[in-house]
Image: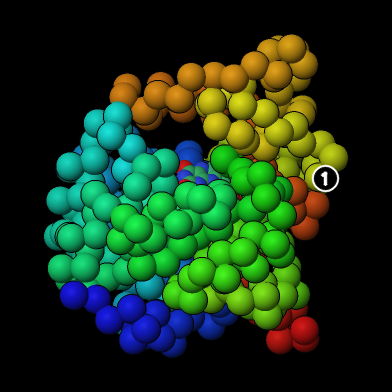
Amino acid sequence: MTDTKATLAAIKARTKLPAICAPMFLVTGPEMVIAACKSGVIGSFPATNARTEDQLRDWIAQIDAAVGPADAPWAMNMITHTSYGRFDAELALVAEFQPGMVITALGGPHRVTDVVHGYGGLVFADVNSPRFARKALDKGADGLVLVCSGAGGHTGDYAMMPFIDEVRSFFDGPLIVGGGIGTGRAIKAVETLGADFAYLGTRFLATEESLINDAYRQMVWDSGMEDLIASRAITGALGNWMRASVEAAGLTPEDMAATAKIDFSQDMHNSAKAWKSVWSAGQGVGTVTGRETVAEVVAKLAAEYDAA
Ligand SMILES: Cc1cc2nc3c(=O)[nH]c(=O)nc-3n(C[C@H](O)[C@H](O)[C@H](O)COP(=O)(O)O)c2cc1C
């Protein structure tokens, strides 16, 4: 069984900054995770980014070997939706390599709790509403990731401050908060609001370690929050997409007003087609303006955090 408070304290003690380099589809690979952990923030990645089960094993082994006890820990993000075909194989790798944190998305946390609690790890459920937060806690999550309005990838509908306040009215356990956090000052602010960790995706999206191509990188550097379109058309869930990539893909405003069907039953690399042609970023995209490594981003965040 997991001692939640002690495990959370042990994880915090290994970080220099209360922040997580958030998992990003087709963006995060082992290099980004390792660089984040070595820089002092938790590095996480979506298991689905590895094309095959063998590649996933290689990635995890590489990360596990590189990240030592003096580094921040790494975390794995898993799709737990029942239609996701690779779930059992991914869970077996979790049991084998025992990441201290597993973050579940697009499905309930209950499918992983037995395994993760069995070795003393923590299960965080990615949620975008108080209703899903309560549901995840009922299903055994130790902690929550609140994905708020303005987040990159699949975004939330709710504003960060009231979302934290409402969840804090019924939950006093481990809390991670994401959506538009792009500076050390903002990390400090969410800590003040009651979060244990800030969850930053977009701030790391265009780093040297990112798997995106240079055109995507340039678009991130050139974009601000007004250059995004929130739409359900690409994946079925509400996502923030860069307008320039939407236009380049030939999609019209009518196309973007539609809702796509959610389906993870095919291998995720089917849906990769959409993510490869239409590019996502969150409303904090204006904080990313040029070439940086993960370590440089973390150093800036740490300086801003300390100054705040
Ligand atoms: C390009 C991109 C891809 C993402 N892919 C995933 C994903 O595969 N799984 C996931 O749980 N979250 C994904 N996210 C969301 C992030 O994990 C995180 O919730 C979000 O980036 C936080 O908001 P921010 O981008 O404003 O920092 C993605 C975000 C971006 C920008």
Farthest residue to the front: give it.
170
Q: Position of residue 18 (x, y in %)?
A: 55, 77
- The number of numbered badges drawn on the structure is 1
In which image quadrant can residue 165 be found? bottom right
Which residue is nearer to you in this view: 7 or 20?
7
Which residue is nearer to you in this view: 230 or 69?
230
Q: Position of residue 91 (x, y in %)?
A: 20, 50
Q: Is residue 41 visible?
A: no
Rendered position, 235 above or below 55: above
In which image quadrant can residue 152 be found? top right
Residue at 73%, 70% in the rendered image: 186
The answer to whether 211 appears left or right of 178 in the picture is left
Residue at 58%, 24% in the rendered image: 234
Name the quadrant of the N terminus: bottom left
Mark 1 residue crowding within 10 angstroms, few (<14) / some (14–19) / many (20+): some
Rendered position, 304 above or below 212: below
Q: Is residue 145 visible?
A: yes
Please state which amino acid type lies under the numbered disc 1: Gly
Residue at 55%, 55% in the rendered image: 130
Name the quadrant of the C terminus: bottom right
Q: Position of residue 126 (x, y in %)?
A: 46, 53
* Residue at disc 1, secondary structure: loop
Way the structure is coloured: rainbow
Q: Position of residue 132 (x, y in %)?
A: 48, 50
Q: Which residue is mark 1?
A: 224
Residue at 46%, 62% in the rendered image: 144
Rendered position, 145 above or below 66: above
Cβ of disc 1 within 8 Å of ligand 1? Answer: no
In which image quadrant can residue 48 be found? top left
Which residue is nearer to you in this view: 252 or 66?
252
